[in-house]
Each structure stands twice: as C-alpha cells, then as structure tokens.
Image (spheres, rainbow, N blue to C red):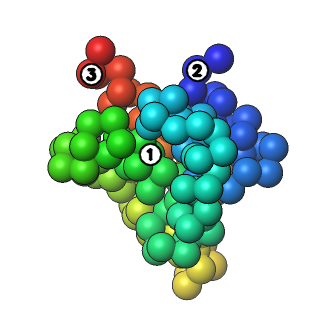
Amino acid sequence: MKKSEQAIENHKQCMSCSAAVLTAFCEEAGMTPEEAMAAARPMAGGRMGTCGAVLAAKTVLARKYGADDPRADELEKRFQQMNQSVMCRELKGALTGKPLRSCRGCVTDAAELLEVLLRDDS
C-alpha cells in the first residue's frame, strides 16, 4: 500500500487530517506512530489556520530535509494551485458556505503531493 493510501485509510478510521498524514509518513519523519499522533494534535481542525494535512506534510519534509528545504514551500504552492487555498476555514467554506475541498480530499492531496516530493529525492 502506498503511503498516500495509508493516509486516506487513517482518515477513514477517524484520525484527524494531520494525524492521518503524519502517521502514514512517520518513518520518513523519523518518528514513531505515537510521536506522530502527539505532534499532529495541535495542527488538527484548523487550529493553526493552515490545513492540518498540509502542515503535517510540511512537518515530514522539514524533519527529513531540514526546516529551510524548499520542498515544503513547493508542497504548499502545489496544494494552493489544486485547491485555491491552504487555509482550513476557506477549504471548509466556513465564511462562504461553499467548501473548496473536503477534509478527506485535503488528506488525499497533501499525502499524494508529499509522496511525489519524497520520491523526487530518490
């Protein structure tokens, strides 16, 4: 199973968006699943403004390649192009009543982009 598929399965099992992505890629981030779950908590549910799935994917990249690596910016840029925003409330349509992308869709997009950016390194 691809890591992006695992992230989707994690979300289907009621993990938050951030936990679904971070636990699927915890090995790449140098974390245990338990550490990934704990690290994902503050990112979930838009509490940090940005989509939790995007923040989790950027966390994996930062832990693997360093905080200044351009792949994190590239991931955010590509996600923005796909979904018109990286802000959780905008993606959920909190102000407009018209969601841009479902949480599962955000998990899918962030995990697939992360997979591509990790693969580009190999």
* Residue 60 location (% of width, % of height): 42, 42
In primary-sequence order, the first of circles 2 and 1 is 2
* Residue 2 location (% of width, % of height): 58, 20
Residue placed under numbered mark 2 in the picture:
2
What amino acid is found at the position of numbered circle 3 in the picture? Answer: Asp
* Residue 24 location (% of width, % of height): 60, 34
The image quarter in which residue 13 lies: top right
Residue placed under numbered mark 3 in the picture:
121
In the image, taking residue 87 as reference, residue 108 lies left or right, namely: right
Residue 97 in the image: above or below residue 24:
below
The image quarter in which residue 117 lies: top left
Quote the CA–CA distance across marks 2 and 3: 17 Å
Residue 91 seen in render: no
The foreground one among 14 and 77 is 14
Q: Which residue is at a point 78% across and 43% down the rendered structure image?
A: 12
Disc 2, SS: loop
Q: Residue furthest right?
A: 13
The foreground one among 89 and 28 is 28
Q: Residue furthest bottom?
A: 95
What amino acid is found at the position of numbered circle 2 in the picture? Answer: Lys
Q: Which residue is at a point 51% across and 29% down the rendered structure image?
A: 27
In primary-sequence order, the first of circles 2 and 3 is 2
